[in-house]
Amino acid sequence: MPIKFAKLPFAEAQNFLRRKVNLPTETWKDIQDGMHVSAFVIAGAQKEELLSDIRASLQKALDEGTTLADFKKDFRATVQKHGWNYKGEEGWRTATIFNTNMRTAFSAGNEAQLQRTKSRRPFARYIAGLSANPRQDHLNWHNIILPIDHPWWSTHTPPNGFGCKCRKVSVSRFELKRNGWEVSRNAPTSPQSKKGVDESFHFNPGLVPLEKIGQVGAEKFIDKSS
């Protein structure tokens, strides 16, 4: 069954993608982790015009609620227009681009809302097991409850990998008491632990305020060590 994202406008998610800076890259390893907050990249897409067209289709999905099927049609037309010889099978490539960007944008928008309401709902809960084949590490984090600004969230806010459908939701003190939940004491002690998180997903998409995304020039995001 195809993944369905919310069709109602989600301004924070829309603005997250809209404010990014296009960054041509050769491989998906050209930038890492938090650099993805401000840089819009598609692995192997090295033309500004190509990036802009793909990005426009993703923005349309956020703004108008268009689907992966719509994105595939746009992608095919864009590839033909620019003569782009991309790697991978079309279905896999389009699903990866669409789902990763949509989930990251929704995560950033969700974080903006969590930050706005944290005085009333000061905790966040990790929800796993939403994928057909969830990762065991992610299942191990299911029901971890920590303060919204706990450092663990800086590296473990979903999505935590390609295809990850995990969620981070706010929790009030009343909900803790009503459900018999407790704030977790056994969360990983080091927020830099990378076990269970795919490479280049060790960041909180909403860590940078929306109004500051894209203010740094794209050249600042290139990882010179790669």
Image (spheres, rainbow, N blue to C red):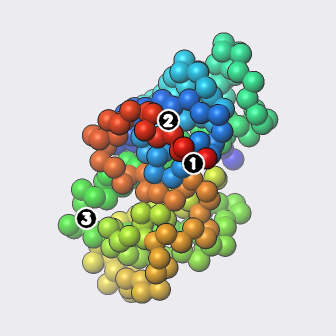
Q: Residue at x 38, y 70 (%)?
A: 151
Residue 120 place in picture, x, y as percent:
22, 67
Q: Residue at x 69, y 47 (%)?
A: 1
Q: How many marks?
A: 3
**Residue type indicated by callout 2:** Phe
In this rendering, which labeled residue sits more in front, label 1 or label 3?
Answer: 1
In this rendering, which labeled residue sits more in front, label 1 or label 2?
Answer: 1
- Picture layout, residue 31 above or below residue 80: below
Observer-nearest of 226 and 35: 226
- Name the disc covering residue 118, or none: 3
Q: Is residue 53 left or right of residue 217?
A: right
In this rendering, which labeled residue sits more in front, label 2 or label 3?
Answer: 2
Q: Is residue 137 left or right of residue 63?
A: right
Q: Residue at x 38, y 75 (%)?
A: 146
Residue 194 place in picture, x, y as percent:
57, 68
- Measured in 3D between alpha carbons, the distance from the residue under mark 2 to the one under mark 3, in whole angstroms, is 29 Å
Residue 224 place in picture, x, y as percent:
54, 43
Q: What residue is shown with label 2?
A: 40
> In the picture, residue 99 is in which quadrant?
top right
Residue 199 place in picture, x, y as percent:
61, 57
Local secondary structure at mark 1: loop
Estimate how packed mark 2 is, as few (under 14), some (14 to 19) or many (20 or more) residues with alpha carbons within 10 Å.
many
Observer-nearest of 40 and 46: 46
**Residue type indicated by callout 1:** Ser
Observer-nearest of 13 and 225: 225
